[in-house]
């Protein structure tokens, strides 16, 4: 873990911070998927921003392809109909794009075992995308769901 953290810090400090103009179009399209109010993900946005063999990884052992990821996105769209992902920073280095964002929303029912209270959450998310031919080929992501649950349980 220490080596991965050092590598990410090196990547971030040695890379260029992208402006809105420099942010790759596929990144903008991919994140627009989380801003479209719909009961399901917009498959057109996913297909146009990712490669056919795109993998979304939450750990080295847990990667999903397009179809499985779309089902996960659909589940979140149903559970948190007002979920938003706001991009805060984009760092581009070669074929890697690091996105720091804020994920927020209000679950409409019980969420990961936390009873529905009507409370909202807002947590940080970090995504590292590998680009190929202008599209996302692999994504590694971390969202602070423990903090989200803590906010939902708050008294």
Image: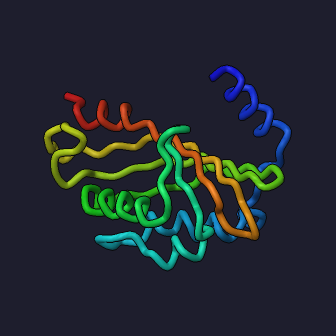
Q: Above or below — where is 79 with respect to 100?
A: below
* 36 relative to 126 in the view: left or right: left
Between residue 104 and residue 7, name the one nearer to us.
7
* Spot occupied by residue 83 in the image (x, y as percentages of width and height): 36, 57
Quadrant of image for the C terminus: top left
Please tell me whether residue 145 is drawn above or below residue 101 in the rendered image.
above
Could you tell me which residue is drawn at 25 percent across and 37 percent down? 152
The quarter of the rendered structure image containing the N terminus is top right
Viewer-nearest residue: 132 or 44: 132
Q: Is residue 76 above or below residue 61?
A: below
Q: How many marks?
A: 0
The colour scheme applied to this rendered structure is: rainbow
Classify residue 147 by image quadrant: top left
- Is residue 77 left or right of 29 when viewed as pictured? left
Q: Residue at x 30, y 30 (%)?
A: 150
Residue 141: percent from the left, percent from the top? 54, 45
Tell me where residue 91 appears, x and y as whole percent: 73, 49
Query: What x and y, as percent, mark residue 84?
Result: 42, 58
Given residues 4 and 31, the one toward you in this image is: 4
């Amino acid at each position: 873990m220490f080596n991965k953290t050092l590598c990410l810090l090196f990547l971030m400090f040695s890379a260029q911070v992208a402006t809105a103009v420099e942010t790759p179009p596929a990144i903008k399209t991919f994140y627009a998927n989380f801003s479209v109010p719909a009961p399901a993900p917009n498959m057109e946005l996913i297909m146009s921003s990712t490669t056919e063999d795109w993998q979304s990884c939450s750990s080295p052992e847990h990667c999903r392809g397009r179809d499985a990821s779309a089902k996960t996105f659909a589940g979140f769209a149903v559970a948190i109909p007002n979920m938003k992902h706001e991009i805060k920073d984009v760092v581009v280095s070669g074929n890697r794009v690091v996105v720091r964002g804020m994920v927020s929303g209000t679950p409409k029912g019980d969420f990961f075992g936390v009873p529905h209270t009507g409370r909202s959450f807002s947590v940080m998310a970090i995504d590292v995308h590998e680009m190929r031919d202008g599209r996302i080929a692999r994504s590694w992501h971390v969202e602070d769901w423990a903090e989200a649950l803590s906010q939902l349980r708050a008294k």
